[in-house]
Image (tube, grey):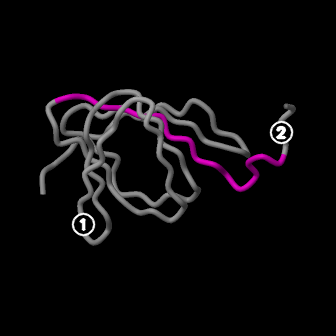
Amino acid sequence: MADYDDAVCEVQRDDDEMRVALWWFEPGTQTEPHTHEYDYIVVPVADGRLIARSEDGEETKVRLKPGKTYSRKAGVTHNVVNDTDSGVGFVEIELKKGFGKTHQTKV
C-alpha cells in the first residue's frame, strides 16, 4: 500500500446541527480511515475521481462532478484517497442529531 499525505480539511461550520467542511485532495492524499458518526451529504466542487477504501480493503471508485450531490447514512467506515494526477474537492455536510429542531422554514 502506498504512503499518502493528508488531504486538507477546512471546517467552515460546526455547531449542534451540522458540521460543514471543505475537503481538498491533491494527488497522493487521503483522509485517513474514519467512521462517519452522522448522516452526510457530499457536494463536489471540482471534477475528478477518488477511491473509497472500506475496512475490509474493498475499493470503490467515486467519480465527482460539480453539482452532482450524493448522500450516505451514518456508520460508513472508509479511507478516501486521491491516486490521480489532479486535485479534487468537495463540501461535506454532516447532519447532527439536533438538525432541524431549531429552524422553521416559511414558504
Give, as a three-letter code, the residue at label 2: His
* Residue 19 placement (x, y as % from top left): 60, 41
Position of 54 with respect to 11 (left or right) is: left
* Residue 11 placement (x, y as % from top left): 53, 34
Give, as a three-letter code, the residue at label 1: Glu
Q: Residue at x 57, y 55 (%)?
A: 39
Q: Which residue is mark 2?
A: 103
Q: Residue at x 28, y 59 (%)?
A: 53
Question: From the viewer's perspective, is residue 68 above or below residue 31?
Answer: above
Question: From the viewer's perspective, is residue 96 above or below residue 18?
Answer: below
**Between 5 and 36, the one nearer to me in the picture:** 36
Part of the protein shown in magenta: 86-101
Residue count near mark 2 (Cα–Cα under 10 Å), binned few <14, some 14–19, many ≥20: few
| Quarter location, residue 48 | top left
Q: Residue at x 25, y 51 (%)?
A: 61
* Residue 24 placement (x, y as % from top left): 36, 31
| Quarter location, residue 4 | top left
Q: Earlier in the sequence, mark 2 or mark 1?
A: 1
Q: Which residue is mark 1?
A: 58
